[in-house]
Image: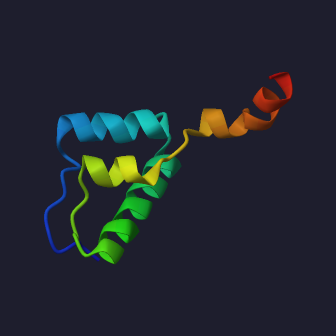
Amino acid sequence: MPLAKRSDLSNEPLSRRVFSLSEGLIGEIVTIVTKAAVAVIKSGTERIAKASIDELRHVPISQRRNSALRESLL
């Protein structure tokens, strides 16, 4: 289902931000965009923008995988 307003996902800086957060993994891209879509629908803005992505505070998978190991080393 499309959002009410056009999102900025084709904007190069935003698409690079999503790509960076997803580390190029398709499943992660889908997760990020889906979470952003749900958030903007709940907020009523109905438009994904850079702020929408930043507000997700998405942790890249490489950091999630190694977080327990990283904590034990600190």
- Residue in the picture at 31% in, 55% down: 52
Left or right of 61 in this view: 52: left
Q: In which quarter of the image is the N terminus?
A: bottom left
Q: How many marks?
A: 0
Left or right of 68 in this view: 11: left
Q: Residue furthest front?
A: 74
Q: Residue furthest right?
A: 72
Q: Residue furthest top?
A: 73
Q: Quadrant of the C terminus?
A: top right
* 9 vs 22: above or below: below
Left or right of 72 in this view: 36: left
Closer to us: 64 or 25: 64
Q: In which quarter of the image is residue 7?
A: bottom left
* 72 vs 1: above or below: above
Estimate the x, y position of residue 55 in percent, counting from the top left. Answer: 39, 52
- Residue in the picture at 31% in, 73% down: 43
Estimate the x, y position of residue 6 in percent, counting from the top left. Answer: 14, 62
Q: In which quarter of the image is residue 63?
A: top right
* 68 vs 53: above or below: above
Coloration of the structure image: rainbow
Estimate the x, y position of residue 27 in percent, counting from the top left. Answer: 51, 51
